[in-house]
Image (cartoon, grey):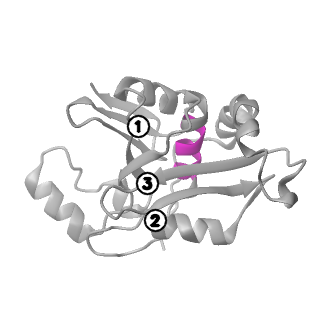
Amino acid sequence: MTEKCTTGMTRRALLGAFAATTVAAAPTLSNAAGFLRGAGDIRRIRMYSGRTGERLDMIYWIEGDYIGDAVNEINQFMRDWRTDDVVRMDLRTVDIMAAAHNLMDVNEPYMLLSGYRSPKTNAMLRSRSGGVAKNSLHMKGQAADLRLSSRSVNQIAQAASACHGGGVGRYSGSNFVHMDCGAVRNWGG
């Protein structure tokens, strides 16, 4: 079980980001299951993992309710692939990821580089790189490192920052963006 993130995104900021993207997202869901017909507010996440070969494309929230089975699949997908440890991801991070994706108006799924990281994995990565935080939000299931081949690091980071939901780190040299539900802040170049 992960610790709740108490700083960062407000419900109002997140709902605003989704409201701005609902019209753009709706046409891509025209063939969704019958129970979604007429659904006002839905959230969808699309990702793949270059490490495991797994893909995820699902609606995980409908009109105010998270879908339990979908959330479980997200948790499994975003596991520490090195240790196979699974935690409950903080869904505010998933919401930021989905809202940023909608703002960019792309169909391409995110490439997930890192979701949850076990303390063991984080310590190993920290020993190899100065850019890994000792108390990384990845270890709490509150962060993700993502890439899109059709968008630049700056474009992805701008979309994530527009959500005003948490931390956004630009890692241009490694071609990825960090998104988390911690305090609103930006770093990198």
At mark 3, the secondary structure is strand
- Separation of marks 1 and 2 at Cα, in angstroms: 17 Å
The mark that comes first in sequence, 3 or 2, is 3
At mark 1, the secondary structure is loop
Q: Position of residue 82 (x, y in %)?
A: 26, 70
Type of amino acid under label 3: Tyr
Give the side of residue 96 with respect to residue 177, left or right.
right
From the viewer's side, name the closer residue of 125 and 113: 113
Write down the residue under mark 1. Answer: 148
Q: Is residue 13 above or below residue 132?
A: above
Magenta stretch: helix, strand or loop mostly: helix
Q: Position of residue 170 (x, y in %)?
A: 32, 32
On whether residue 171 falls in the magenta region, the answer is: no
From the viewer's side, name the closer residue of 89 and 174: 174
Write down the residue under mark 2. Answer: 77
Write down the residue under mark 3. Answer: 48
Using the rendered image of the protein, determine whether residue 156 is visible from the camera's viewpoint.
Answer: yes
Type of amino acid under label 2: Phe
